Each structure stands twice: as C-alpha cells, then as structure tokens.
Amino acid sequence: MVASDVPADRVWEVFRQESEGDPMIHAGNVRAPDEELAVHYAREFYGRRQESHRLWVVARDAITELDDPDLLQPPFDRSFKRPSGYLIKHKLEAAKARATSPEPPNE
Amino acid sequence: MDEQQRADAFYAHVVGGGKVEADDWMPDDYRAAVLKFVEMHANSELMGVLPEREWILRAPTLKRKLALTSKIQDEVGHAQLLYRVAEDLGKPRDQMLADLMAGKTKFHNVFHYPTRSWGDVGIIAWLVDAAAIVSQQALRDSSYAPYARTMKKICWEESVHIMHGRDVVLTLMNGTASQREMVQEALDRWWGPLMQMHGPPTDPATDRDLIWKIKSKGNEQLRQEFLGIYVPRIWELGLTVPDPALAYEQGTGRWTYTEPDWNELRSVVTGHGPMSQQRLEFRRENFAATQWVRDAVLGAAPVAAA
C-alpha cells in the first residue's frame, strides 16, 4: 500500500468508564486521521462534561467481531447451565416433609 | 513527588475505597499481594476440577453428566480468567503453572481430598461452592478493579453450580435410605475441610489484604456468613452436621463451633493432604500430554535468542 492509498481518516471506537472500577462500555465512535487526534475528539465527545473517568480509543479495524447465532445462541437445551434450569421447589418440600415426619414414607 | 509520597497517596486512595486498574501505577507491595491472592485463586480453580472430573463417567444420568461437564468447563474457564488477571500483574502464565506443578504455590485445602461417592459430587457443588461464593461475592468489591469485575462473571456461574449441587443432594435425600446415608457420610467427611476453608481468624489491624481492600471481609466473617445461610438449609433436610458444639447464639448473633483443625489446614495446603501429590502428578502428566497443543498453537519453542 502506498501512502496515497491510506484513507485520510479512520473510524475509532470509543469505550468509556463512567466511574472508577466500572467496566469499559462502548460509547460511540469518531473519525480521525491518527490516534492523537482521535483521542482529542473522543475527549471532546465523551469526556467534556466530566461524565467519564477513563476512555479507551480503538481503531475499528483492530476489532474482530463474532455474531454467528449458531455459535452464540445455539438451539439445543442448555438449561442445566442456568440457575433456572433446576426446579427444586417440590423436591425441597418433599425432603423437608420427610425430615420432619416421625415415620418416613415407604420407598 | 518521590516514591514514598507516591506510595502513601496510593494507599490513601485504596484505603478510602478507590479502585486500581491494570495499567495504573502501584507500589510493589500491593502488586505482590494482589498477585499472590489471585494466583492462589486461579490455581484453586484449575486444581478444583480434578476431584470432580473423576465422576464425569460415573454420573447417574445424561443430564447430570452434561451439568457436571459444564461445571468443570466453567471452573477451568475461571482459572483462565484469573490467570489472565494475574499475568497483567507481571508474572508470566508459564511461571505460574510451573510453580503450581512444582508445589511452590498453593491451592485451596478442599481440593486436596478424595471423592468417594456421588454424594461427594453433590456436597462439593452445593457446599464447597457455597463457601467459595461467600468469599467470591465479597471480592466483587476488591480495590483491584480487573479482579472485581472478573468476580462478577464468576459469581454468576457459581450460582448455577450451587443449584446443580443442591439439586443432586435433594434428589438423593428424596431417594432411598442408602442414598440418604451416602449424603450424610459425604457431609461428615467434608465438614472439617469446609470449616477450615476460609482460614483462621486474622487480626484486621495487620491483615494487609483487608487493609488494602484486596478483599473486603475477614476469614471469620465469611465463615459466619456461610454458616448463617447454609446450616439451616442442611438441617431442614434432616442431615446432621458432625459438630455437637455447632449452635447459633441469639445474644451475639454468631455461630459457635468446635475449633477447626488449623494444623490439618496448614499441612494440607503445603502439599501433605491425602490427595495433594496425586493431583499435582495428574496436573504434571496432563501438562506434558498437552504440550503438542501448545506447540501447535504457539509454534515450537525458539531454539535460542539470536
């Protein structure tokens, strides 16, 4: 790639941390020819009103995306991976009843 | 600002509830303390799957096999997340694994014991994970923010493991007399290690992990919280906790119990537990057996630096 093929500006994705210790959350993006100017723009758009504790500025072409539903939302039942996949109400009632009854029910 | 003033300002920040990010400046003492804490946690997640993996092929139903396999995958994932947090503090992952396999670093006491029955699988997933989640929930407030955020994800997954374990225990308790005996026998064996798990009480005035808010609750406070939630849940199933001195004191709002065997704890975590050496040997064999995967992914090790 020769110098003239480099786009005049690139898209930079901006992530912001609202308060100390918070996760970095996507805020938006800016266009800028280089990192230095991208950081200035990010500061003007997302940090001008003291609403950010920290910003991350990342070139969009440095981000790799995965959105394949076959991988992220597979159709099989995986309820055993969630707390709601275990319905213990009746089992708990039965076990408590057994524990408090003088004569255990027949097995 | 000289180094001492800089350190003083840093400690005032964390003592006052301030957070620290991976690329922030931090004093060496703080860095070393966080690293030691997180590395031990990561080691425990990695070693903690070994007792459970012994039961994958013996799980009683397909659903239990899937759930147990999924739990084990989660725990290895936690180890990966935590080694990542630790690596950012400056110790390479290779070195952490080498130190673990050489017995130079520790992992939690409960993973040095054998699993003898399917009842153990239920007790581990329910009560060992419960004791762990009590301390892990407190770590979501850690002054080291990357660790705190990682704990949010880990706690979410651990809550599934506790449900899985409680469901296993409830199913057995609603089963036959011998299945109930199996749970009771497992509880009898695990109670001692469970009571030791949070460690002996420490002096809050000298516990640096507490002062620097790397952890937010002391050992005894965590044990009291565990007892407060889980002893009633154990009792309501008709199970007996094998400690005649265990009681809740209305006046103080505290649980009293027989002093845990701290000598056993010290002995076990320094590699003298009933399964310590077998588990480390398995980890070493597994590391050697998977060398080809690392070679394939990373390329063969460079011969020598030019």
Image (cartoon, coloured by chain):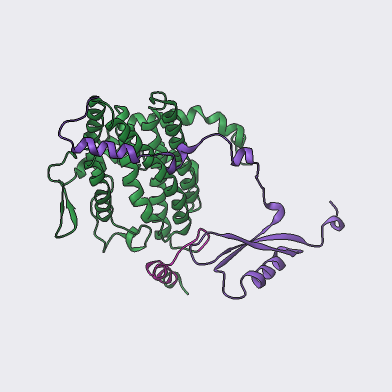
The region drawn magenta spans B6-24
Q: Is B236 drawn above or below residue B147 in the view shown?
A: above
Q: Is B300 drawn above or below residue B34 in the view shown?
A: above
Among the 4 quarters of the image, the one containing residue B75: top left
- Camera-side residue: B148 or B66? B66
- Residue that appears at 28% across and 48% down: B198
- For chain B, give the colour: green
Which percent across, then down, holds residue B134?
A: 33, 51
Q: Which chain is purple?
A: A
Which percent across, then down, holds residue B116?
A: 29, 27
Which percent across, then down, holds residue B136?
A: 37, 51
Relative placement, left or right, of B114 versus B142 is left
Res B280 seen here: no
Which percent across, then down, holds residue B302?
A: 61, 37
Res A8 seen here: yes
Relative placement, left or right, of A102 versus A67 is left
* Placement of the C terminus of chain A among the 4 image quadrants: top left
- Residue that appears at 38% across and 29% down: B281
Q: Is A49 drawn above or below residue B231 in the view shown?
A: below
Q: Indicate whether residue B264 is drawn in magenta.
A: no
- Residue that appears at 47% across and 49% down: B153
- Residue that appears at 41% across and 47% down: B39
- Camera-side residue: B248 or B84? B248
Identify the residue at the far left of this view: B244
Among the 4 quarters of the image, the one containing residue B292: top right
